[in-house]
Each structure stands twice: as structure tokens, then as C-alpha cells.
Amino acid sequence: MIEKYFLNVEGLFKSFGKNLVVHDIDLKLEQGEIRGLIGPNGAGKTTLFNLISGFLTPNKGKIVWQGKNITGSAPSTIVKNGIARTFQLDVLLKDMTVLQNVLIGHHLHVNIGVIAQLLGLGKVKEKEKEAMRMSLELLEFMGLLELKNEIAGELPHGHQRSLGIAIALATEPKLLMLDEPITGMNSVEALNTMKKIKCLREKGITILIVEHNMRAVMSTCDKLTVINFGQKIAEGPPENVCENSLVIEAYLGSPDDEDDLILC
Amino acid sequence: MQKNNSSKFYGFLIITLAFIGLPFLLSEYHRDVAITLLINFILVSSFRLITTMGGWSLAHIPLMGLGAYTSAILTRYYGWPFWITLPTGGAVAALISWVMSFPLVRIKGFAFFIASFAAGEAMRLAWTRIRYPFGGHRGIVMIPVPNEIIIPGLFSINFYDSIPYYYLTFLITGVSLIILYRIDESRIGYTLKAIEMEDRIVNSVGIKATQYKMISFVIGAFFAGIAGVVFAHRYQSIDPSAFGFLTTLYLIVWVLFGGTKTFIGPLLGVTVLTIVQILLRNLAEWLPMVYGFILIVTVLFLPEGLEGLPRKVRKLWKLYNPKVK
């Protein structure tokens, strides 16, 4: 059977001890779409990210990527296949410069074996030069070029988020998974970032976003998937999902998220 | 940037010239200390390579011993020339460390200490217990010095003398340090530092962290083995106690005292402590205590080691001279 979907997640289960965190979730992405993944805190969104990117192994279910079963593969294998991710917290190489962070991100591009690197064989220098050029381009795209020699851990939150995206982009992904990319940014930065995300789609990258800022999600995503208590409760275009009674209930259930509902 | 590079180059040049001239200024005893210092340079630098990936291996000195034993056995009992056993000693240490690294690179923190310690001690016990070819407690004596180099009619170099041996060691140390420095400055060095800093990022960009950790462990062991060979042929006798925990402790103090962030840090640490050791020559029994004291003071007041000292001084300077900017 020819796989119809770009990424096809089927019947995924994950539990930590007795807590069932992801409960029978299906997620089907088509090439070139921007999908939003929303849900109240603790709904299992980040766990789902970790399962797809290989940081966790599901108890049951399968993940098929471009017709290839990647369930339970190591993170390094999955990213090699073209799925990159960012992290929720500011997970960066904090003591390194912005440029070094992105250069490390180009590992797959330069990777020609450790021994070859040691002996300086083959195209090491050429590849390094290319990596440098591409890193600078990426930093320019993310608006971080002037900050390239700053220490990553000393950047303001918003810039750290952008850097996280730049590192993920350095792996030249086909699917980019963004975990709360604009949390901690001011509204101008957030708007810019969302613009960039749309721009990435134009370049042919499929995008999956987890984000709390409903306004941003509404205006950017083609389709939303809503999960609560580890289960999918709704899926569809943003306008439809917003009117779904289950979704409203899920969000009203936690008073913290009331703001989001009003935005919606 | 350019200026920084050229000052680095001149610094390097001056230090190199100083080490070339050194043996003519020293007494026989101090020449021996200088040879030991050069051997220790290889030790601390290779040890630092392992620490960049976050593991403080307690098997480093036993791996040095492995190189020493390999070369001693091959030259003493099988008549191999030093020039072949030198790389062989390194290679055997690298091979054994490669086997050890399978479990070692998969564990972290405290467990890594214990496991590497156990692996090193197991090796040392084997030397103690097995009479042939390791010689048990007494070890191996009458290890030949490197073969004489004779160019007929011109000159001959006899490595019994300390000056030729000094230059031999200088050459081996120089080459080792250049290789280790180049690794540190390469993508491999950066990747190892990145692995220690944040392994999630490293995993997420497709780096196989365990592979890199193994490589650093094996390269480190190779140079430890080389250091061991040079050591064995200078003193011409080795025994298991030379590679015991006390030596490991010294190694750790040297590296901690110098600091591990920069390449020069551990080299600085071992140099300063060697000078301290010479000054306290008459108090040899007290040396472990002095080292313990230095370790405590370093951890308390200089957590970044000697290399962090300039920054600290600058900070204090600013504190007491608030007007100066």
C-alpha cells in the first residue's frame, strides 16, 4: 500500500507508570501543511513530540514517516530522515556562541565520519566552509546575524527561541516540529516568527506547532488538532475547531486558559 | 582577532624555545623532573580530552600503565625496538579502552567514576597477580632504553643520557600536544563540548553522542599509553604501584588546579604544581597532604582553576577600584 500521508501516527499509547499520557492518538499530516497541536497544560502534547522525534518510545502504536516505519528509532536516526524539532524550554548550548550553536546543528551536513575528520581527509574543509555559509544565511533569516558572536545563554528569551528554530533548521528538515516557538516573545517578535514559519512552508517544509497563543495558531495553521488528557478530541480547520463544544469545555475546565478562549 | 592569534603564536614560540633551552640550564636531578613534566603534559592533555565530554575517567593512569607494560614486555622479552613499541603501547591502551568504553560511555556521573575506577583497578590487579609476563608486585626491571641512533662517521645518540632522552620526550610530547590541540579546535572538540553541555540538542541534530564519547575515550587512552611508554623507558623499571590510585589523584589535582575549559589550563596546572613539588623536595612524605590542601583550596576558591584566575583578579580589582572602568 502506498502511504497517503507524509507523517502517519496510528494508535499511539504512552504511559509513565500508571499515568496514561498519550492514549490512542492518531495524527495524519499532509506534505506542506502547517498543523497546530493545541490542548490544555498536561494534555500530552510535548510527550507526543518526544514520541515522534524518538526521545521516547511508545508502548503501542506506530509512526510511519514517508512510508517508512520509524517507531522506536533513535533521535539521531529520525532527524537524519528529515524530522527536526525544537524544545519547549530554552534548551541550547548555553556556553557557546550563537554561531557555534548553528554550526553544531549542521552536523549531518558535515558528517563524513569521525576518522576522516581526524585525519582531515576528503572534503572536510570544503564542507566546513559550506556549513559556515549556510549557518550565516540561517542566522540572517532568523534575524540573529548581528548576535552571532554572543553567548547563547545570555540572549533574551525571544532570541533564544529563534536560535532554537535556527538549530533545528540547520538539519535541513522536511518536517519541522516547533514546541511553543513564540512563548516568551513580545507581540512584535511573535508576529515576525509566525511570518517566518509561513515563509518556511513556502520553502516546502511541513510544520507541526504546539503553541498556547491561540491568536497566533488561528492565523497561521491550516488545521488544528486538539488533545486533552492524552486523547484527540477534535480536528479540523481553526474556525470549526473553535466552535467545537468539547474544545470549549476542555479549555473552560482549566481557568488558567480562559484568556486563550477569549482570544479565540 | 588577528592580534590575538599572533600573540598566541609568539607565546607558543617563546614557550617552545624555553623548553628547547631548558636542559642546559638544569642539574641532572632537575632534568629528570623536566622529563617527567613533559610526560605529564601528555597525560593531562589527553585526560582533558576525556573530560570535555563530561567524564572524569579514573582509568587513565592504569591505561598509561598498560602502555608502559606493553612496551616493557615487548622490548625486554621479545627484543622489539622502542621505535615500534612506542606506537604499539599507545595502540594497545587504545584497544583495551575501546573495549572498556562500550559500557563506560553509556553511564554518567558518579557511576562513571566507579566503573572506570573498577576497570582500571582490575587491570592493575592483573599485573600484580600474574607473574609472567607482568612480574607481579616487583614489576619489570631492566627495561632497555631506546636503541642508540648511530649515523656512521657523523654522530651517535645514546639515550642513557638525560639530555638526549629529554629531547626525545620533547619531540613526542610536542607531536602529541599538537594533535590533541587540533582535535580540540576541530568540530570533534566542539561536538564533545556540546555533548557535555546539552545532550538533548546534540541528539536532536543527529549526533550519535556515544560514538563521540567513545572516540574521545579511545584517543585519550592512546596518548596515555604513549606517555606510559616514554615513562617506562626512562626509569627502566615499572611496577603496579606506580600506576595506583595516588597517581590518579595527582592527575586529577593537576587538571582541576589548572582548569579544563582551555587547552592551556591543565598544562599550566601541572607546571605550577611541579614547581611546588620541587620547592617541597625535602617534605616528600607530606606531598599527598599538600596536594589535598591544594585540591580543597582550588575547589573552594578557584572552581575554574588557574585559568579562571585572571577573571577573578579583574573582578576584585573592579570591586576595590569602582571608579576605574
Image (cartoon, coloured by chain):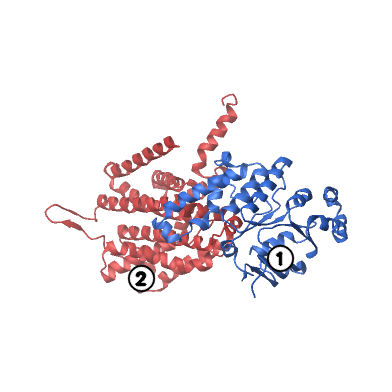
Chain colours: A blue, B red
B310 relative to B164 in the view: left or right: right
How far across and how far down the image is residue B84, in percent?
29, 64
Relative depth, front residue between B240 and B49? B49
Q: Are marks 1 and 2 on the same chain?
A: no
Q: Is residue B303 visible to us here? A: no
Quadrant assignment, res B85: bottom left
A253 relative to B133 in the view: left or right: right
Label 1 close to label 2 by CB (< 8 Å): no
Q: CA distance from mark 1 to mark 2?
A: 68 Å
How far across and how far down the image is residue B286, in percent?
46, 50
Q: Which mark is residue B135?
A: 2
Query: Residue beneath label 1, please?
Result: A28
CA neighbours of label 1 inside 10 A, class few (<14), some (14 to 19), many (20+): some
Disc 2: host chain: B
CA neighbours of label 2 inside 10 A, class few (<14), some (14 to 19), many (20+): some
Disc 1: host chain: A
Q: Which of the two discs, 1 and 2, sits closer to the camera?
A: 1
In the displayed structure, would residue A152 be above or below residue A12?
above
Q: Is residue B235 visible to us here? A: yes
In the displayed structure, would residue B186 be above or below residue A63?
above
Quadrant assignment, res A36: bottom right
Residue appearing at x 54%, y 33% in the figure: B314
Relative depth, front residue between B295 and A109? A109
